[in-house]
Image (cartoon, helix red, strand yellow):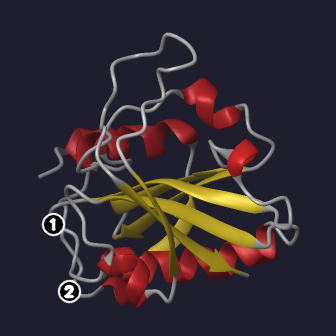
Amino acid sequence: MVEQTDDLFLKQRVAPSSPRKMTLREIGVRHAMRYNELWHSRLPITVEGNLLRNKRFVFYGSEYMDHCFASAIWTDPVANNRLSKDFVWLELRRLAIAPDAPKFTATWMISKMVKQIKKSFPEVTRLVSYQDTDVHSGTIYAAANWKSDAVSTNASWNETRKRNVEQSLSTKKRWIYDL
């Protein structure tokens, strides 16, 4: 449960009965990072500079009664050099859902974000996200009509230069959504 000081307003936190009662809005990078740290199932650590150095980025929160119940971080793809140049891509880097969020929050939020991204980033033609197969089954992407595209196994990001400790070395499934 999120302490009251973690939300923007000091009101009693009441969870909505349905994600349809929430509102999607853009939030600041630091709020998105903080919610990700609190709620992400596998990758709680983000670095502000790595998020803001991109040409395109946007951060969303799903709110109800002045409290956030989910957050998302979108940027240009991390592995942009490995992706097809036939598309302009935007990557869902993190999607973090509060434990008290209503069922289906993730799929509802993805649907709302896709519509908003189409308006805000008309140059973007494809969305991408990576599922950690050790802890997730991909249900949210399948339910939101994304297509399973590829699978990578235990790829380390530390092979070319010294980085922080790896957060996950599990197999990843890549999901795409064409706009």
Along the horizontal axis of the image, is 123 left or right of 110?
A: right
Dividing the picture into quarters, in which one does residue 136 lie? bottom left
Up-down relation of residue 63 to residue 94 (above or below): below
Q: Which mark is residue 100?
A: 1
Q: Amino acid at mark 1?
A: Asp
Name the residue that disc number 2 marks: 17
Nearest the camera: 144 or 156? Answer: 156
Query: Percent x, y for residue 163?
Result: 47, 15
Whole-number angstrom distance, CA of label 2 to CA of label 1:
10 Å
Number of disc labels: 2
Q: Amino acid at mark 2?
A: Ser
Query: Percent x, y for residue 124?
Result: 80, 67
Quadrant showing the C terminus: bottom right
Up-down relation of residue 48 to residue 85 (above or below): above
Up-down relation of residue 142 to residue 38 (above or below): below
Along the horizontal axis of the image, is 118 left or right of 108?
A: right
What residue do we see at 34% from left, 26% from top?
166
Visible in this render: residue 76?
no
What residue do we see at 81% from left, 43% from top?
55
Q: Regarding mark 2 in the picture, which secondary structure is present there?
A: loop
Nearest the camera: 153 or 29? Answer: 153
Visible in this render: residue 97?
yes
Query: Percent x, y for residue 158?
Result: 47, 21
